[in-house]
Image (tube, coloured by chain):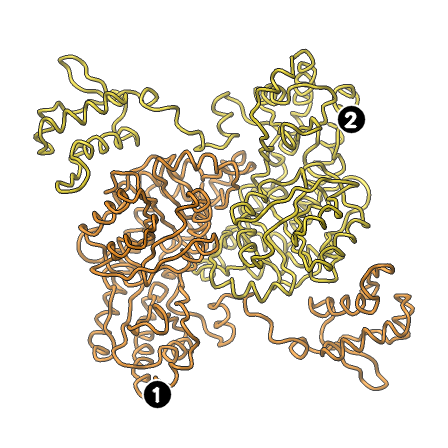
Chain colours: A yellow, B orange
Amino acid sequence: MIFDFPIIKNGKMPLYLQLYKNLRGSIRDGRLEAGARIPAIREMKEITGLSRTTIENAYQQLMMEGYIESRHKVGYFVLPLEIAEPPSPDFLVSEDQESYRREGKRVRNAGIDPNSFDFSLWRKLLAQVLREENEELNRSGDVTGEMALKQQLRDQLRRDRGVNCSPDQIVIGAGVQVLLGMLLPMLPKEMRRVGVEDPGFVKAQYVFEDYGWEIVKIPLVDGGIDVKQLKETKSRLAYVSPSHQYPTGTVMPVAKREDLLRWAEEEQGLIVEDDYDSYLRYAGNPIPALQGMDQGDRVIYLGSFSKLLLPALRISYMILPRPLLRAFQEKKNRLTPSASKLDQLTLARFMQEGHYERHLRRIRKIYRKKNLLLTEFLAKEAGDLVSVLGIESGVHLVLEIKREVSLDQIMKKARAKGIDLERIGSVRSAHQRLLFPYSGIALAEMDGVQKDLLEILKGSESDDGANERAESSGDRESKDSKTGK
Amino acid sequence: MIFDFPIIKNGKMPLYLQLYKNLRGSIRDGRLEAGARIPAIREMKEITGLSRTTIENAYQQLMMEGYIESRHKVGYFVLPLEIAEPPSPDFLVSEDQESYRREGKRVRNAGIDPNSFDFSLWRKLLAQVLREENEELNRSGDVTGEMALKQQLRDQLRRDRGVNCSPDQIVIGAGVQVLLGMLLPMLPKEMRRVGVEDPGFVKAQYVFEDYGWEIVKIPLVDGGIDVKQLKETKSRLAYVSPSHQYPTGTVMPVAKREDLLRWAEEEQGLIVEDDYDSYLRYAGNPIPALQGMDQGDRVIYLGSFSKLLLPALRISYMILPRPLLRAFQEKKNRLTPSASKLDQLTLARFMQEGHYERHLRRIRKIYRKKNLLLTEFLAKEAGDLVSVLGIESGVHLVLEIKREVSLDQIMKKARAKGIDLERIGSVRSAHQRLLFPYSGIALAEMDGVQKDLLEILKGSESDDGANERAESSGDRESKDSKTGK
């Protein structure tokens, strides 16, 4: 019986407050829906054994707060929750889903290409693993990841990215944030200052913050982090994305890479190389990973399958330099696994049978085509409105807006059309830059998105941008869409 | 060509050191295997363009360190890695796998029951999700978890555990450690002292440590944490497992639960309720969760599917009290998802179609039977050697060894027979207690395991336990096998 709440008679909490909280709880969590009848005071007295005054006090409180109403001669009834409470926090749905629901639209440009992933093949491999590896699946996985996957990864990273490592240097985790959460507590306390690229991948910076690290933002010069400034910060850890800087898309030149490695040697420091989407390169030679140049065990390599394979899978990896292995071994007994063992074993088969190589070739082709279509279109139709940066790799473009307009306004208009754009850097940044992911646009939809984008960019000319701009709140960071990283 | 290393001529690192490190790297990561021939100095000179002295220096260093050897008049050859280096750290395989490999045995008692999980049903549901939810799978999941699963969880936790919440209070993550990593940075800095049960779940404590919290161990009295001592610590967070204390298996009485809730109200504190395996209860009434008694929004509820469903899946959940939702909303934009969306959507279907309820009923029956067999056997055959505690629920027993023996010795002997036992509490603990998981023992294997266990316990009588005991290192903690939690 729903109103038969447990009441603690000799507790410190007044009885009316207990009843009030019980009822409020039932209304909030939906057991008592809007319109439901609450027992009259007399009935409630019988159900609970509480006094009339106690019940009246509880009901008064609920009415005051807008949870219930009294209808004359009829009784008490639950009100719709919106009346009682401020709109419920929107954290229960992602931005994507939320805008989808609110506007009846799906986001058209984020996520992976809708035709890139071979679901039936994955289904087949999953079925194989479920049939053949029962015993493995019945016990928990290795906290550092499954050996079968690590062996595949070692071979593939050597081949495609010039990464040198043995499988025992690889740690698998459910996302780059989880991996950083394993790494940071291993590093010496006196190291807790990190130099990061500005702009850079803020979701990595958040993890450093959470672990109490000081974050020093270092501007980009000549294709990458300013090594001279990095040196001046006296930090001993740098977080960089040398092969495809996030978000600007630049490539760190070899000379700077050498400077950076030398810096690490001299400071007895470490470099975290975030190599998040360097497979997707459309122009020039492939850029090998910094890790492959490292002779001094100074580079921690980070990578992820989310952008490249399927965002629904959460498999990322970190390659530790050998001197960190001993520290990690100590740490290892403190950890539990995070990435799904089922997904890991399936991915290992996917790689072993050559499907991953084929998949990479296919998506490189798809994304190159989109990249080309978009950059040509923007150059031709919107050359006076935007410069397009970061076009040589990855799955997003950087739109540098050429005049003083409200980026917030542009983002809002884009969102209304199901297009996600994101501000790069802070509101006060010298540049007016927006990040425009194009991975999720189906080729068939490309024309429509282009047309809408042009309209948004053109429409913004007539707006009073400066006004809007002042409204936006403070030094807000780019929200950073790489949730899948 | 493998010996054509990149050499930086004007770099700060001496040339011989560069060559040495390149060669060492190739040997370490297996590109140069034991027995492989290294080019003679003259050949290497041609390949690299380096001077004779440089190459000789590099080879000297490698020989000195045991990576290569010079065979007179034949050349230089790579030595087996064991000679050059201390045995490679064992972190690359879990303890289970390691002992399996080393001893050619599998662990017989850990993991879930080998016949409990319906793999073909799961395969069917996975296939459905992969066929029907392509669009969902192509984009990254909600950082708080999939709504479909949260709705199922809400209903199921209400029904089975008396938990009150709405789906928006639920956060899904890839393990309890990941969830704590989301929670702790949200809590006010001045709160950073936590009272924990002693003995308790140390893998949770590690996360607190990593985030810089002070940990105060509080003894168990009368079926749970000593609330009076908790109060004296002036901490405002308590981490408890009230419905099935880990590892001792006691149940916190209602009066203590009320004390604990009152403590939280008075101190403006919070309680983390780790409800990790309370579904499995074999005697007495089901014990509802503490969360359901909480009238003051003081309880954070933690649960996991690893023990109950399949360790290969990494899906755990946390229920936040409403006052924390606002703080979490801020935090949310900083996070990326961790639990596989594919697994989450499959689990949601599994629950929605009633399979989870049936699964729980089935495993309760299986584990009850094992529990009964073991406790009866131990009472009858080993009553003079051990007392058995924690028999009313869960999937492990606590063996309290009645005489002064070496627990390390017992554990070692057990391991040789493929039986995992773990020390509870520190080496200096007043009690001689071992944790004995029985979930993984197939019913058909039960007789064999019982026989072996008896032999191990009996054998230990003749050992000089005191000797061995002094050898074991310091105040080491229980290793805690709940990696799957």
Label 1 marks a residue whose chain is: B
User: Which quadrant is the C terminus of chain B positioned in?
Assistant: bottom left
- Identify the residue at horizontal 89%, vertical 72% (top origin): B43
User: Which quadrant is the N terminus of chain B positioned in?
Assistant: bottom right
Q: Nearer the viewer, residue B245 or A52?
A: A52
Q: Quadrant location of residue A164?
A: bottom right
Q: Is residue B78 visible?
A: yes
Circle 2 sits in a helix, a strand or a loop, which is it? Answer: helix
Drawn side of residue A203 relative to residue B441, left or right: right
Q: How many marks?
A: 2
Label 2 marks a residue whose chain is: A
Q: Nearer the viewer, residue A6 or A454?
A: A6
Drawn side of residue A198 relative to residue A337, left or right: right
Q: Quadrant location of residue B457?
A: bottom left
Q: Nearer the viewer, residue A161 or A343?
A: A161
In the rendering, at what x and y percent does residue A271 appear?
Answer: 67, 53
- Spatial separation of the CA atoms under disc 2 and disc 1: 82 Å
Q: Is residue A160 visible?
A: no
Residue position marked by numbered label 1 in the rendering:
B464
Q: Residues within 10 Å of mark 2 (few under 14, many from 20)?
A: some
Drawn side of residue A433 relative to residue A380, left or right: left
Residue position marked by numbered label 2 in the rendering:
A376
In the rendering, at what x and y percent does residue B480 appear?
Answer: 40, 64
Q: Residues within 10 Å of mark 1 (few under 14, many from 20)?
A: few
In the rendering, at what x and y percent does residue A352 appear?
Answer: 63, 56
B256, above or below A247, in the image: below
* Three-letter amino acid code at the position of disc 2: Glu
* Three-letter amino acid code at the position of disc 1: Asp
Q: Nearer the viewer, mark 2 or mark 1?
A: 1
Q: Quadrant location of residue A113?
A: top right
